Image (tube, helix red, strand yellow):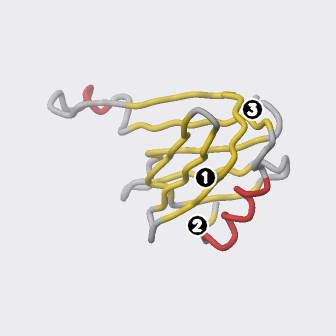
Amino acid sequence: MDPIDTSKVQPIIERFVGEDVYIHLETTNGAYASHFNEKVFSAGAYIRNGKINYTRGKITGEGPYRVGLKMDLGWVYAEGLTHWELDAKNRLLMAGHDMDGKLAVALQISETPFE
């Protein structure tokens, strides 16, 4: 994955506007953080192959970045994104890594379900 360049990522986000797409959205501060330090509150969210159709998509910020996908009845939103790639299956893969390089957030958009 490469560091996010909004001038490259924004046109790809817009490419999926108005299409039925599948998203993978995941956040974590370390599922096992409380195992190592009981004072650390562990939280996360996960959805895979959520089928959506968004009317507007935007990447903003100075880095780490935020991506919002506006749907008829709400939003999909991810914050803390630092890296991206467009893979061989035309899937937009975005991730946010913490200072130790560990995954903190992922937002992926695909025209086909994730395996």
Q: Earlier in the sequence, mark 1 or mark 3?
A: 1
Left or right relative to 4: residue 55 = right
Task: Tell me which corner region of the image, top left, top right, bottom left or bottom right, holds residue 76.
Answer: top right
Q: Which mark is residue 114?
A: 3
Q: Secondary structure at mark 1?
A: strand
Q: How far, Cα to Cα, is label 2 from label 3?
A: 22 Å
Question: Where does the image place residue 33, in percent across and percent down from the top left?
Answer: 29, 33
Looking at the rendered structure, the secondary structure element under dot 3 is loop
How many residues crowd around disc 1 within 10 Å: few (fewer than 14), some, or many (20 or more)?
many
Q: Position of residue 22 (x, y in %)?
A: 73, 34
Horizontal placement of 99 versus 56: left or right? left
Image vertical order of residue 29 relative to residue 82, above or below: above
Q: Amino acid at mark 3?
A: Phe
Residue extending furthest toward the front: 72
Mark before the other along the chain sequence, 1 or 2: 2
Asked if the residue at tag 2 contacts the one at tag 1, i.e. Cβ–Cβ closer than 8 Å, the answer is yes
* Label 1 – label 3 distance at C-alpha: 14 Å
Type of amino acid under label 1: Met
Residue highlighted by disc 1: 94
